[in-house]
């Protein structure tokens, strides 16, 4: 009898080991599938989507967030630019950003560094963990805070939260989680570097405004989006008055400073969703999605007045008085008919014609295309 009992216990123990082995194998396959998704992500938003949405669903978590460490404002600029693109605004871009926190404050960075030596698993403590789950910590029972390192540098934290108080315990093995954090860190660094290079190729090297290629790409995207939602799209065509005279009198370095000065003024006057580009020389353009004629005119006039009232400083005792001319064009996509590329060309051409009218009639003024018809 005792032998039968012993055999039964051995069998039960063996069954338990087999069940644990099968569970571990299933978990390993899940992790491997997630690694493949991370490695095959085609863009930074795709990668964020895999980590924040797919990982949460695959492993039955309640929330996944990321805390990323700023690197010389590059990271913030990259995220701001890419998540403002029309395609992501249409999809889940704004929602994804709610789960991503980019830290640049020195005190916060110090706190992160102190916590980044190893994974932190255990019961959720709002005082300690809320910084990792901003606006998403309510109701959490246990968390796993996973440092993401690359070449000895802290990239940030991948933060997993569950309402189950027993999901993560301090004594639990974290091999799989550390591997996930490593893969996530490698993938994020690669995606950020690729996106940085892509954005560099779409920027004007002098002013850091977008370049001509990016402008027309975004213009087409915004018109396509406006057609689907019956929104309006506006365009400003801006020219720095008497630019040749500035170069001749003060030199080309002064001309460069004037272009940068105007770029900064325009950038501060427009919305985050608007796109400023230097089309060439002293000419700039802005595409303004989902805007009214009145609002567009307000923005243009504010830009013109600010440029006129704020001289460009060349040194401690030298400044240049500047002025600009602006042409406006506006399409109501509820009534406009045509392909986005064709409509974009027409919109820019109309703004260009309005700009030419402004320059021929005294400069330092704003003119709308519809107001010059018949003149």
Image (spheres, grey):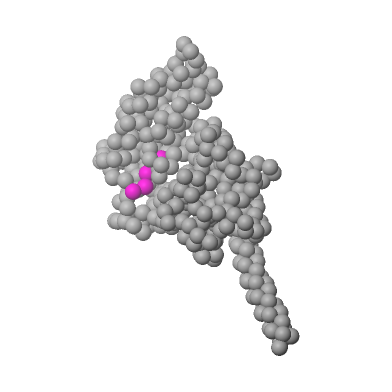
Does residue 326 appear to the left or right of 314 in the view shown?
left
User: Whole-percent x and y of residue 235?
Assistant: 37, 42
Q: Nearer the viewer, residue 212 or 18?
A: 18
The residue sitting at the bottom extreme is: 1
State the residue at coordinates (68%, 76%): 13
Magenta-drawn stretch contains 190: no
User: Whole-percent x and y of residue 358?
Assistant: 33, 32
Q: Considering the image in quadrants, where does the N terminus appear?
A: bottom right
Tag count in the figure?
0
State the residue at coordinates (61%, 51%): 119
User: Whole-percent x and y of residue 202?
Assistant: 54, 43
Where residue 201 sits, quadrant-wise, is: top right
State the residue at coordinates (37%, 44%): 288
Where residue 300 sits, quadrant-wise, is: top left
User: Whole-percent x and y of residue 222?
Assistant: 41, 51
The residue sitting at the front extreme is: 2
The residue sitting at the top extreme is: 317
Above or below for 319 versus 139? above
Above or below for 224 versus 349? below
State the residue at coordinates (70%, 77%): 14
Q: Nearer the viewer, residue 55 or 241?
A: 55
Q: Is residue 220 visible?
A: no
Q: Main secondary structure of the magenta part?
A: strand
Q: Considering the image in quadrants, where does the C terminus appear?
A: top left
Q: Is residue 225 visible?
A: yes
Magenta-drawn stretch contains 288: yes
Magenta highlight range: 286-290
């Amino acid at each position: 009898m005792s032998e039968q009992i012993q055999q039964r216990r051995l069998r039960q123990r063996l069954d338990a080991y087999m069940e644990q082995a099968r569970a571990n194998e299933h978990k390993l396959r899940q992790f491997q599938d997630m690694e493949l998704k991370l490695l095959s992500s085609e863009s930074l938003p795709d990668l964020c989507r895999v980590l924040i949405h797919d990982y949460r669903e695959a492993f039955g978590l309640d929330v996944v967030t990321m805390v990323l460490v700023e690197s010389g404002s590059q990271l913030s600029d990259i995220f701001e630019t890419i998540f403002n693109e029309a395609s992501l605004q249409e999809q889940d871009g704004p929602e994804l950003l709610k789960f991503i926190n980019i830290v640049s404050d020195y005190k916060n960075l110090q706190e992160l560094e102190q916590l980044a030596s190893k994974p932190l698993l255990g019961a959720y403590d709002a005082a300690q963990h809320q910084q990792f789950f901003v606006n998403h910590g309510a109701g959490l029972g246990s968390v796993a805070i996973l440092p993401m390192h690359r070449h000895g540098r802290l990239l940030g934290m991948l933060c997993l939260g569950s309402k189950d108080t027993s999901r993560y315990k301090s004594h639990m093995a974290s091999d799989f989680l550390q591997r996930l954090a490593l893969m996530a860190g490698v993938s994020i660094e690669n995606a950020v570097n690729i996106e940085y290079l892509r954005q560099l190729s779409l920027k004007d090297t002098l002013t850091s405004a977008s370049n001509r290629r990016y402008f027309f790409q975004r213009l087409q995207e915004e018109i396509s989006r406006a057609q689907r939602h019956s929104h309006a799209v506006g365009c400003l065509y801006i020219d720095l008055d008497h630019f040749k005279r500035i170069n001749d009198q003060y030199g080309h370095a002064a001309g460069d400073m004037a272009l940068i000065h105007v770029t900064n003024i325009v950038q501060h006057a427009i919305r985050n969703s608007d796109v400023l580009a230097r089309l060439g020389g002293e000419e700039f353009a802005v595409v303004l999605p989902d805007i009214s004629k009145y609002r567009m005119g307000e923005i243009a006039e504010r830009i013109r007045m600010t440029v006129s009232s704020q001289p460009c400083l060349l040194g401690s005792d030298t400044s240049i008085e500047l002025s600009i001319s602006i042409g406006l064009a506006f399409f109501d996509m509820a009534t406009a008919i045509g392909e986005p590329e064709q409509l974009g060309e027409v919109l820019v051409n109309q703004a260009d014609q309005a700009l030419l009218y402004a320059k021929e009639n005294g400069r330092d003024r704003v003119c709308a295309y519809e107001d010059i018809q018949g003149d």
